[in-house]
Amino acid sequence: MSIDIPWARAELAQFLKLTELYRQPDPPGVFSISSHLSNRGKQSEIVASAHVVEQILDRVLPRWRTEVPAGHNKSVNRWYQHREAAQRADAALQRDADVRDRLGDDAPQLSAATMHPWVWSGARSLWQSGHFREAVTAAAKKVNAEMQNKVGRRDASETALFQSVFSKDDPRPGQPRLRLRPDDGSDTFRSVQRGAAAFAEGCFAGIRNPHSHEDGLPELPENEALEQLAAFSVLARWVDAASLAT
């Protein structure tokens, strides 16, 4: 996974140290039978550490908030779920490099967090709760909205909008164009514009529309959803980098 494993493991270890449970010793001359347990670290230190650890957990165990039991947070300690998730994540990180090395899987890893910000910001909350199909749909909506913002249009969306905006024709009143390269009249310019329009149609007609218009579809496998996010990330980068012609 694309993460600094030594750093992440050190952060998890520090959090586990701060949240370790122990029974405070009785004052001199006092004997208590209380079973109350306290955390080793100060609450302010734990909160600061948790801010970083939660982001690590979101990367290593995206569904930890729903898959790791939280029932003991009230009965035992506020940080019980975080501690178990941190222990699981540490084990995953510890074994990840070794497993990939022994299995011969040293291929590059694709991370959703490195995709275009429009895509990941649209998909993130749904992705982290395991709703991968809805996450892809949300990313598609975000890319469409940013396109509308860039060209100042609300009268068209998705396939129709992208085909119009990436058209090789000259811009018209109310119909601006996006140029991925200078319009020098070359075959390369026409090919790039035609390819962008076709790619956008594939993204919306082939990916976004089935997710939104077909009921009862099974949840999308995480690896397939990641591939679909990558497609919209490519489209988002083209829109973001293109120059506006009016």
Image: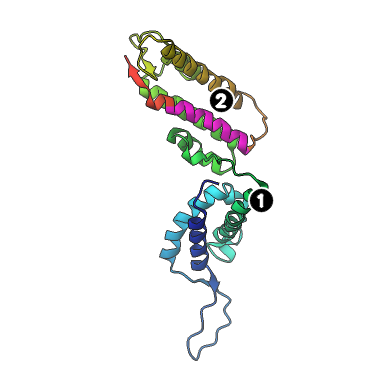
- Quick one: 78 or 144, which is closer to the camera? 144
Where are the magenta residues, as a range?
A: 222-237
Instruction: Assign the C terminus to one quadrant of the image.
Output: top left
Q: Which residue is mark 1?
A: 102
- Quick one: 34 or 188, which is closer to the camera? 188
- Quick one: 19 or 13, which is closer to the camera? 13
Q: Which residue corresponds to the image point at 51% horizontal and 78% vertical from the top-left?
A: 24
Q: In which image quadrant can residue 137 be found? A: top right
- Quick one: 110 or 20, which is closer to the camera? 110
Point out residue 151 in the picture as x, y percentages from the top left corner.
36, 20
Report the number of numbered marks.
Answer: 2
Q: Earlier in the sequence, mark 2 or mark 1?
A: 1
Q: Is residue 16 placed above or below 192 in the rendered structure?
A: below
Q: Which residue corresponds to the image point at 45% horizontal and 55% vertical from the top-left?
A: 52
- Identified by mark 2, the residue type is Arg
Magenta run includes residue 93: no
In the picture, measured across the screen, residue 182 lies left or right of residue 161, that is left
Point out residue 223 in the picture as x, y percentages from the top left corner.
61, 37
Point out residue 8 in the picture as x, y percentages from the top left corner.
50, 56
Q: Which residue is mark 2?
A: 208
Q: Is residue 138 placed above or below 156 in the rendered structure?
A: below
Residue lying furthest bottom in this view? 29
